[in-house]
Image (tube, rainbow, N blue to C red):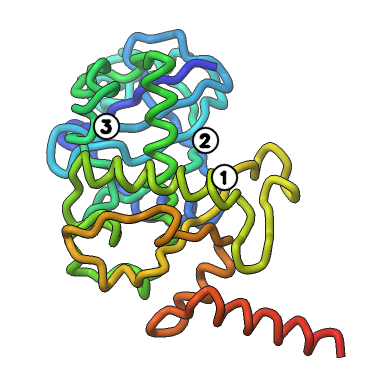
Amino acid sequence: MATFLLAWNPKRWHWNDIAEMSQLVQSGKLITTRWSCGNSKRLQNGDRVFFIKLGQEPKGIFASGYVVQSSYEDLHWDNEKEASGETAIFVKVRFDKLLNPENNNSILPRQLLDAEPFQEMHWDTQMSGIQMPDHVASELEEVWGEFANLHSFLSPEEVPENHAHYEGAVQQVTVNAYERNAKARKSCVEYYGASCFVCGFDFGKVFGELGDGFIHVHHLQPLSEIKQEYQVNPINDLRPVCPNCHAMIHRHSPPLSIEEIQAILGAAGNQSTT
């Protein structure tokens, strides 16, 4: 499986229903779209793709998915060129993540891609269908997974709107801040494992390869209290928790502690057996 970059420039084509499509994808709907891939006929069924927004700020990675129909020729996406009979090369892609760039900060910033090893890739392309080197694609998968899951699943109670540091779900993101977060999450999961610290649920045991390694990471210190100079300690400050327990922790203000949510879960379990 190869990995390719697909570009979107709103100055050239306005995506009218991106907000609605983003909501559908985040709700679990299987959404497929046709996308121009320049002159490339290399994209094959099953290949991985990332979408980058260019042309105007905010710029950066905002979606990912898989090719479900290999490269094919069809009438051009531009109405005038279509009317004159011109054609273009397309693929059909099914999204697994689609963040809405119209929402503040819900896009992996372009400036993050200036760091190693991402700088080996030409990100500011005006043509879709550029293949990524395998090691760049692998690193992007890890960084994108962290970023997209955070922005897809964090509840409003968890993210203060005026917060300025990435650990609190970013108004401004720096390379160093994001790298600390990604490495901290990885260290937390390596230390505690990928099962929920509250209820013990393990996605890998239930869903197999699909769920292997999937878990949220909870900050023991409330995000609203994190200051800009805060440096997370992955062992002392973080715990792996499943999305259900994570949501319940943050239904209370201030968020419940791990011990408190464990006690509630234990009491509910005892009641259900009587």
Look at the numbered discs 1 and 2 and tell me whether their residues touch, using CB distance below 8 Å.
yes
Q: Which circle's residue, 1 or 2, is located before the other in the chain?
A: 1
Q: Residue at x 46, y 43 (%)?
A: 186
Vertical placement of 180 versus 123: above or below?
A: below
Q: Which residue is mark 2?
A: 94
At numbered mark 2, what does the secondary structure look like: helix, strand or loop? strand
In the image, 77 versus 232, the foreground residue is 232
Q: Which residue is mark 1?
A: 30
In the shown orientation, is residue 32 left or right of residue 123? right
Residue 128 % position (x, y):
31, 20
Q: How dense is the environment of label 2, judged by Cα within 10 Å: few (below 14), some, or many (20 and up)?
A: many
Which residue type carries mark 3?
A: Trp
At numbered mark 1, what does the secondary structure look like: helix, strand or loop? loop
In the shown orientation, is residue 273 left or right of residue 171? right
Q: Which circle's residue, 3 or 1, is located before the other in the chain?
A: 3
Which residue type carries mark 1?
A: Leu
Query: Could you say which quadrant of the image residue 146 lies in?
Result: top left
In the shown orientation, is residue 258 left or right of residue 122? right
